[in-house]
Image: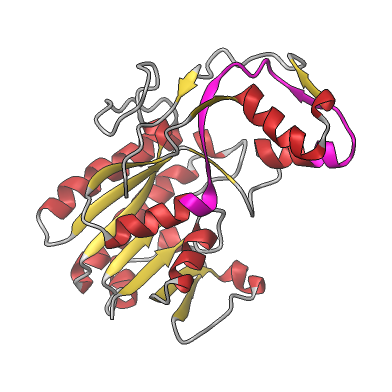
Amino acid sequence: MTKVLITGAAGFVGRHVLDALKRDKIDTKAVIRSQCNSLNFEKSGNLNIVYTDNIFLESVEWWKNVCTDVDIVIHIAWYAEPGKYLDSEENIDCLSGTINLAKGAASAGVKKFVGIGSCFEYDLTGGLISEKTPLKPLTLYAATKVSAYLTLFEYFKNTSIDFSWCRLFYLYGEGENDKRLVPYIRKKLSSNEYVEMTNGTQIRDYLDVKIAAKMIVNVAFGKKIGGINICSGVPITIRSFAESIADEFGKRHLLKFGAREDNITDPPFVVGERIDL
């Protein structure tokens, strides 16, 4: 029976990937921070939990021991606190910790390694983003993601491990941080308060996190390797997306577009080319 190791299972994306693995009754080992033990992960015959004080400070030998009976690694953990993660030095720790995990996994004989990247790794100035779009990171977060991808791609070439890198676009859904767009809109509308936004003309690629999680699992058990877009492939303006949420409440009149200034560095068009997974 195939055994999967997942990191970041307590996070926004990770918890949904873990749920997808549990639904498919996949034998799973989840590595999570000790501080998350209060989340009461439901243990079962298919789920084993390994706690760590800091996943990114563990040694290669530690990871080798944890990965000894593992076939597939799905590495989701990364620092992602809204408003801070783009330029945080913690990204460098995440990069070095990821390389330790990869080396440990290789020593343990893992067959496949799936990493999680971001659409922000790409050059976002050229229209529709395919998996062949050039990389052009503009933040420390994106740069360390690109560094992880390039390093692991070259490293795993010298092993028997298949390597896939899932680049996430604009995810939303259950468990999302309150500071992100969709929870912000819902909270304001639920309280009958005005929702102050930019003009909302930017075009984005939004995808429900549950669908994204299933796509990641499909990558883990599929044959596609290298960089892979995890996206809807459907362009929609932020304005239209916000209006669709407001319509659920019947409160479109509470959306105040133009109340906030547009961010001049915000790319006008971020939409991925979707492939079947």
Q: Position of residue 184 (x, y in %)?
A: 74, 38
**Where residue 70 sits in the image (x, y, percent)?**
29, 74
Q: Is residue 210 magenta?
A: yes
Instruction: Name the foreground residue: 81 vs 40.
Output: 40
Work out whether residue 200 or residue 135 is closer to the camera in this orientation and state it: 200
Question: Does the stretch in magenta take in 82?
Answer: no
Q: Is residue 138 above or below residue 227?
A: above
Q: Residue visible at 46% across and 79% down?
A: 47
Q: Can you name the residue that lies furthest to the bottom here?
A: 45
Task: Return the residue found at the far right.
Answer: 192
Residue 100 in sight here:
no
Horizontal side of 24 relative to 61 (left or right) equals right
Q: Quadrant of residue 217?
A: bottom left
User: Going 45% across and 43% down the picture, which residue do you hit?
Assistant: 91
Identify the image quadrant of residue 104: bottom left
The one of 167 and 83 positioned closer to us in this rendering: 167
Q: Is residue 255 above or below residue 142?
A: above
Pick the residue in front: 18 or 234.
234
158 to the left or right of 176: left
| Residue 6 x, y percent position in the rendering | 41, 65
- Where does the magenta region start and end? 187-211
Please say whether residue 147 is visible from this viewpoint.
Answer: yes
Asked which colour scheme the image uses, the reply is secondary structure
Q: Specify whether 79 is left or right of 124.
A: right
Give the quadrant of residue 146: top left
Is residue 224 positioned above or below 187 on the image?
A: below
Measured as percent of width and height from the top left, residue 69 is found at 28, 80
Residue sitting at 42 percent across and 50 percent down? 94
Q: Residue at x 35, y 54 (%)?
A: 98
Quarter of the image with the N terminus in it: bottom left
